[in-house]
Amino acid sequence: MPRGNQIKHDDLTSRLPTLDIDEGIRIENAGDKMFVNRNASGIFVVQFENDFLYLQTARQVISAVKSRFPKKYTVWAY
């Protein structure tokens, strides 16, 4: 199963504002995963385990990523 296209950490900030509703981003570290999508209203939907966050800005998403993965992580676009 293809994992998607790996993107650099630095590209995550610029990639989030252009995220379309049929695209997503998966962030992983040692089996822990976070998914970021965007709904039709432009709100970011962030899922980790069974929890969902609905965030207004890319900056808020980056803050959530850094709090969940304070160290190394891999980013995939799909």
Image: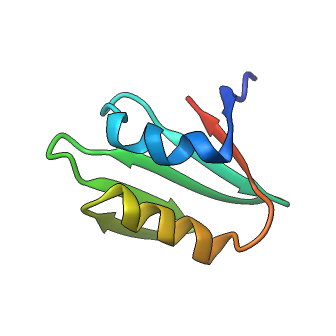
Q: Say which quarter of the image contains residue 23.
A: top left
Pick whichever, 8 or 47, lies toward us.
8
Pick whichever, 20 or 14, lies toward us.
14
Residue appearing at x 66%, y 26% in the figure:
4
Determine whether, in the image, residue 26 is placed left or right of residue 28. left
Residue appearing at x 65%, y 51% in the figure:
27
Pick whichever, 63 or 4, lies toward us.
63
Determine whether, in the image, residue 72 is placed left or right of residue 76. right
> Number of marks in the image?
0
Determine whether, in the image, residue 4 is placed left or right of residue 63. right
Q: Position of residue 48 (x, y in %)?
A: 55, 65
The N terminus appears in which quarter of the rendering?
top right
Residue appearing at x 18%, y 40% in the figure:
40
In the displayed structure, would residue 40 be above or below residue 70? above
In the displayed structure, would residue 17 be above or below residue 68? above
In the displayed structure, would residue 18 be above or below residue 36? above
Residue appearing at x 59%, y 77% in the figure:
67
User: How does the figure colour the protein chain or chains?
Assistant: rainbow
Q: Say which quarter of the image contains residue 77.
A: top right
Q: Position of residue 28 (x, y in %)?
A: 72, 53
Q: Position of residue 24 (x, y in %)?
A: 47, 37
Residue most extreme to the right = 30
In the displayed structure, would residue 69 be above or below residue 3? below
Q: Position of residue 65 (x, y in %)?
A: 57, 65
Residue most extreme to the left = 41
The C terminus appears in which quarter of the rendering?
top right
